[in-house]
Image (cartoon, coloured by chain):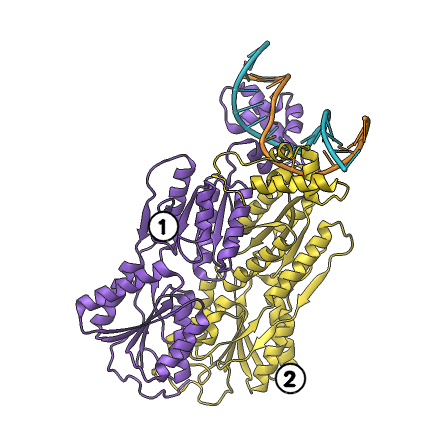
Chain colours: A yellow, B purple, C cyan, D orange
Amino acid sequence: MAHREARQRRPSIHDVASRAGVSAATVSKVMAGVTTVKPENAQRVFDAIEQLGYRVDPLASDMRRAKRRIIGAIMPEFESEFFGQMVTQLESLAEQRGYTLVAASSRESEEREKEILARMHDWRVAGVVLAPVRNEHGPAAAFMKANGMTGVLIDRVLSDDAFDTVSADSAAASAEVARMLVGKGHRHVLVIGLAEQAATVRARLDGFRSQALALDPSIRIDVILSEVSVEPLRASLRDYFGRGERPTAVYSLLLKGTLVALSEFRRRGWHCPNDISLVGFDDAEWMQVTWPAIAAVVQPVRQIAIEAMNLLFRRIEGEEGQPTARLEPCQVLMRESVGSPGNGPHSGGGDRQ
Amino acid sequence: MAHREARQRRPSIHDVASRAGVSAATVSKVMAGVTTVKPENAQRVFDAIEQLGYRVDPLASDMRRAKRRIIGAIMPEFESEFFGQMVTQLESLAEQRGYTLVAASSRESEEREKEILARMHDWRVAGVVLAPVRNEHGPAAAFMKANGMTGVLIDRVLSDDAFDTVSADSAAASAEVARMLVGKGHRHVLVIGLAEQAATVRARLDGFRSQALALDPSIRIDVILSEVSVEPLRASLRDYFGRGERPTAVYSLLLKGTLVALSEFRRRGWHCPNDISLVGFDDAEWMQVTWPAIAAVVQPVRQIAIEAMNLLFRRIEGEEGQPTARLEPCQVLMRESVGSPGNGPHSGGGDRQ
DNA sequence: GTGAAAGCGCTAACAC
DNA sequence: GTGTTAGCGCTTTCAC
């Protein structure tokens, strides 16, 4: 590596060309790996590149090409482990194919989601991985459709007539949760979630309910779905318990719900699993270190990312055909927050920790 | 909005120009807000833009300009709340100034960090916000320096002779933690951390130690610093407690350490704060819902992001002068995990829950 | 095998 | 006031 006290203008392909005594076109060919270049010249080009520390300008390069080697990723938020991992995976997969990932957060706003998409369209990204705020029927997907963008929908989606979709198999996971809870003897379960993310929540709910009822038709399943945000959910929950409802287990359909449930338990001095059991959709690192550890459904982030990118690149490369709707299997992690009812439920919040 | 069944080529500035009956240059001027354009023509341009749904191609635009309106952000990871929030903030601040943020994760690897930086350099980003894996003396900062890139260093940094730095005032926060713990009567405290992130950890450690010793010179402060990763820390901690060491409080200098401490407590059946107190650097959402809630130092993410972007843009706009080293104040959130020693320490892990 | 020429979509001088 | 010209740095025919 030559020691360049670099400042100002970086060497361009023409600098390399003149130093190697060839034309810019030849340099471009050498870099593209075209074999028809005389080995001797190729070597001189490589030498010049090395000496100058030359690197192609991806912008200029993309400018000329048909497709730009940029993938856009739109997530509802960056703050959670799930989407953090997702972006990390997507970034790495995009890189592997020589693409740059440009990630943006819609901050749980459909309006912003559409704006971001418009901006990505301006950038003429080759493809988009969209994790919609709500579901596949939002304005963002419509925008993509209307503008002929190529993309894949992930996470809060079930299936779409225009785009491939990839998400966790929530229904199957929920069914497994049902089997576990019923198996442990629970016959009164509260399910909490956010109605806004309609399709996915429905799947999780139905998966749980049908399996639970199949196992024991007399089981009682209460459901609290908050419309938009998490705070109303907290209020409803507080109200629900305040009315004297005493399910033996709570299944939260989303991470924030798990947090809310825990804090409400805490408020009442209930402990898991003696006073009540808890399972949450979505795992988090802290769940295995709390007292007790919280049982959770682990989403296959990596699988979703890999599958999404595979599908996306297939479309980018021009593959036609009906959109597919993939469901990747989850893993249910049993932990101590789930026990059998009757081992001292609601023993009165003995306040030892 | 005209209903365009968009496919293939988007309208270019020339399409707008010909439709408006002016030249491309005029369109460009109108969009740039130049006032010397005849109002009538300006109007026709606006109309054409609207009818065609025209939007500038930022790539092409940046291509021609001197500086590209792209800011690179490099974080050690995306999975934690802290960096997730940071990216969200940075993205929003960049947008406000008409820039696009391209975020990348170095995945805690200095080697990868340098590669990413090289790629950002290829992109000719206007500036970089770098949260280094280790500290300001790593290869990434050196690369930036050698290539005359403009940037700001954040988080795991103290000060630098080439770049502005912004980080949380760990020392002051740690001093406050010391005041609190000593104030509660703790005279034997274990501090845990990662040695790799040298400078910041030192600052936190020194801040704590000097304040604690100032308050009570006889206080005993044990320190466990794992070299590189968190797992050895767990082993050391297990060993430490296994030897029969019984501090009345633990101060973890990093989030993962807090998790490790909790899980080790748990393994031994200890509960906070009765058996041992715990404070961690870095807050997380779950910490307020566990039993008990975990006391934590909250980093001023937003302030750091704002300050970093201010400094960065000032440099981008050509401001010269000595690099500054900013420290933003933290907030110490007292929660139930901290109590007074002697209220039943090590009472023997009564295994309720 | 290689280079000249054209041009991706835009903006900035500089004429007119 | 506005259009012409000349690129930004690259890739891609298409002659030679």
Quadrant where the N terminus of chain B is found in the figure: top right
Identify the image quadrant of the C terminus of chain B. Answer: bottom left
Circle 1 packing at 10 Å, graded few (<14), some (14-19), many (20+), is many
Q: Position of residue B346 (x, y in %)?
A: 31, 85
Which residue is disc 1 drawn over? B166
Query: B44 or B18, which lies in front?
Result: B18
The residue wearing badge 2 is A215
Q: Which residue is at the far front? A: A40
* D3 relative to A221, above or below: above
Instruction: Report the side of B36 relative to B305 (left or right).
Output: right
Question: How many residues crowd mark 2 within 10 Å: few (<14), some (14–19), many (20+)?
Answer: some
Q: Are marks 2 and 1 in contact (CB under 8 Å)?
A: no
B333, above or below A14, in the image: below
Q: Amino acid at mark 2?
A: Leu
On the image, the x and y values in percent for residue B102 come to: 52, 48
- Considering only vertical position in the picture, is A161 above or below B347? above
